[in-house]
Image (tube, rainbow, N blue to C red):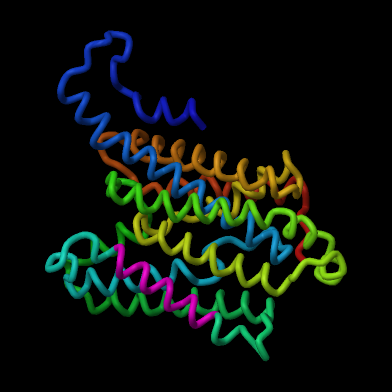
Amino acid sequence: MLIIFIFHMFYGVDIFNGLFSDIDKTILTQIRLPRGFLGILAGGGLSVCGAALQGVFRNNLVEPYTLGVSGGAAVGVALAISLSLNMLLGYFTLILAGFLGAVFVLFLLYYIAIKENRFDIKTLLLIGVMISFMSSSILMLILSVSKTENLHGIIFWMMGSLSDAENMINIWLGIIVLSGLFVFYLMANDLNAIQFGYEKSFTLGVNVENVIRMTVLISSLVTASIVSVTGVIGFVGLVVPHVMRKFFYNDFRILFLASFLGGGAFLLLSDMIASKIIYPIELPVGVVTGILGGALFINIFRKERVKWK
């Protein structure tokens, strides 16, 4: 990841000359450095959440967006843009609107999926998928009644981008993402035990109910924070943990760290491709991750015939 970060940072700059112009210094410090850190945090955070959710649900097809969190964030941001709240209250309004939309979905999931103070996993996943479909329909409704000048902003945000990176945003996002990674790391042994089955892990002393509850809560909050800043960037949380599991199996003590580094590297690489492939036009990075991630995942399925559980 470090090599890709350095390449992402200095691509197109004559570093061997040793004399950076003022323009080069501004580009490096004000644009590429914040953008690089945002890519690492977003890619790493989504990948770690994907690894945790796949572990606790024992299903390799689960990712952070499966629970409908991204759909809630998208509806929140689309509403804010269509009502021009960002023009009145500033850019941070979009981040707040996206976060509130995602948190609303999280509370809705908890309210519906909990039966007699117990999580029903099948209900949780089913409700998450249904919320994603409903969010897509609500987004279409918002797009259909929005003013023409607001449509581009909504659509571009929905496709994901790192272009709005700022140092202050990175600091807050870094605190949330790294805190989530730390808590997940503390839960690694419990997640390792769950891979042997819920009943067996219970006999090993693991409070399965609490592990599920904590995993859903933390991954939803981390994902909501990332989506609120970058928009919807798909496939990172699905593909990267899946690939890393091939190298590190299901030992979550290593898998979390590997997923964070791999996710950051994957998103930085995708951002470089999005920025340069049809230069000077910049593609939304979500388009590149969707194409690369989808092709990679189909190839994995074709070769290994992953069994649906």
Numbered-mark total: 0
- What's drawn in magenta, residue-wise? 95-109
Q: Residue at x 71, y 46 (%)?
A: 245
Q: Quadrant of residue 193?
A: bottom right
Most extreme residue toward the bottom is 116
Q: Quadrant of residue 101?
A: bottom left
Residue 189 percent across, percent down from the top left:
74, 54
Q: Nearer the viewer, residue 273 or 45?
A: 45
- Classified by dominant secondary structure, the portion drawn in magenta counts as helix
Along the horizontal axis of the image, is 134 left or right of 169? right
Q: Quadrant of residue 137?
A: bottom left
Residue 133 percent across, percent down from the top left:
49, 76
In this picture, is 198 found above or below 259?
Answer: below
Residue 292 percent across, percent down from the top left:
52, 44
Q: Residue at x 23, y 79 (%)?
A: 145
In this picture, is 62 found above or below 79?
Answer: above
Q: Nearer the viewer, residue 175 or 166?
A: 175
Along the horizontal axis of the image, is 202 left or right of 252? right
In this picture, is 139 found above or below 221?
Answer: below
> Where the C terminus falls, by quadrant?
bottom right
